[in-house]
Amino acid sequence: VLLSDVIDEDELKTGVRREGIYFGMQGFVVRISLSIQAIMISSVLTSTGYNAELKVQPSSVELGIRSLISIIPIISLALAFISISFYPLYGKKLVEIKEQVEKLHKKKIKKLE
């Protein structure tokens, strides 16, 4: 939903609907995020002494896994909440953007007729 609002605002500013670029960038960000996630998991497991050949892992590995499923997600969510607090498209401004986009689309349709 946030991305579509950004696309609408961009269309008002530029006159061009560039959703392909935005969704392409979103896919790129998702891929980067997955890479960072894999690096974090392997770093935590390596630094806590994980050894795939051992049947019983050291207790430090359990602590590392617990941090991967609790502490790191909590920190990530906190950062996400902080980031979203700066999102400017809400309330009256968002309603105005939606109305302006609708008018712009009607103009474009009339030009095509």
Image (spheres, rainbow, N blue to C red):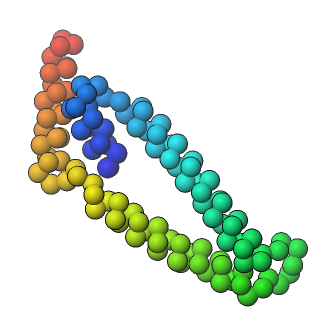
Residue 42, horizontal then vertical, whole percent: 70, 65
On the image, which quarter does residue 36 sit in?
bottom right
Instruction: Residue at 69% x, 67% y: name it.
Output: 43
Residue 98, horizontal then vertical, whole percent: 17, 40
Image check: 5 left or right of 31?
left
Please state, as top left, top right, bottom left or bottom right, where the C terminus lies in the image.
top left
On the image, which quarter does residue 57 sit in?
bottom right
Instruction: Residue at 26% x, 31% y: name it.
Output: 11
State the residue in front, 106 or 28. Answer: 28
Instruction: Residue at 35% x, 30% y: name it.
Output: 18
Image check: 110 left or right of 9?
left
Residue, far front:
47
State the residue in front, 29 or 48. Answer: 48
Residue, far bottom:
59
Residue 10, horizontal then vertical, whole percent: 27, 35
Residue 47, horizontal then vertical, whole percent: 72, 74
Q: Is residue 19 above or below residue 106?
A: below
Image check: 4 left or right of 65?
left
